[in-house]
């Protein structure tokens, strides 16, 4: 569980993070959705670590970011059910879930450092 985020549940705050990599996840309609992995997500005001990593679905806000870029953004802290759940998970005996915390609705993106180019 992300204990630092739990303390601030429901608040909209400013964060700083670095783009680790891009990926994909399957969606309901079958077309893969692009995802982004952020590492070292910190509170922008204090610099304290909020979480080591965080996955987002890529939207217009992140489509132009590059791997290695460090940026700041505003987001709301919210809880979600993490783990396997639903009818199929019950059938396979995999049902287990817990409440965890994530960030949602990122806005006001400001690039702090572009990615470092290898020479």
Image (spheres, rainbow, N blue to C red):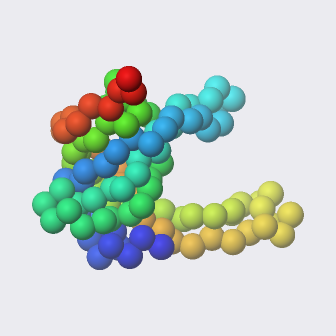
Percent position (x, y) of residue 78?
Answer: 36, 61
Specify whether residue 110 is in view: yes
Question: Which residue corresponds to the image point at 63% horizontal and 70% vertical from the top-left?
Answer: 97
Between residue 68 and residue 16, name the one nearer to us: 68
Q: Is residue 53 above or below residue 81?
A: above
Q: Classify residue 81 by image quadrant.
A: bottom right
108 left or right, relative to 38: left
Between residue 83 and residue 18, name the one nearer to us: 18
Percent position (x, y) of residue 12?
Answer: 21, 57
Give the position of the C terminus as an image quadrant.
top left
Which residue appears farthest toward the left when viewing the image? Answer: 45
Q: Is residue 119 above or below residue 88?
A: above
Percent position (x, y) of residue 1?
Answer: 48, 73
Which residue appears farthest toward the front when viewing the image? Answer: 119
Question: Which residue corresponds to the image point at 25% horizontal and 51% vertical from the top-left?
Answer: 16
Specify whether residue 57 is in view: no
Between residue 108 and residue 89, name the one nearer to us: 108
77 left or right, relative to 44: right
Between residue 87 and residue 107, name the one nearer to us: 107
Question: Which residue corresponds to the image point at 69% horizontal and 63% vertical from the top-left?
Answer: 85
Question: Which residue corresponds to the image point at 15% horizontal and 65% vertical from the top-left?
Answer: 46
């Amino acid at each position: 569980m992300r204990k630092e985020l739990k303390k601030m549940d429901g608040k909209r705050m400013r964060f700083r993070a670095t783009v680790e990599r891009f990926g994909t996840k399957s969606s309901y309609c079958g077309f893969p959705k692009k995802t982004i992995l952020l590492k070292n997500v910190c509170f922008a005001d204090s610099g304290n670590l909020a979480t080591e990593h965080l996955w987002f679905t890529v939207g217009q806000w992140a489509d132009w970011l590059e791997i290695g870029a460090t940026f700041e953004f505003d987001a709301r802290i919210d809880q979600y059910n993490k783990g396997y759940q639903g009818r199929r998970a019950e059938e396979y005996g995999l049902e287990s879930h817990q409440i965890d915390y994530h960030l949602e609705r990122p806005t006001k993106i400001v690039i702090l450092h572009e990615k470092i180019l290898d020479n």
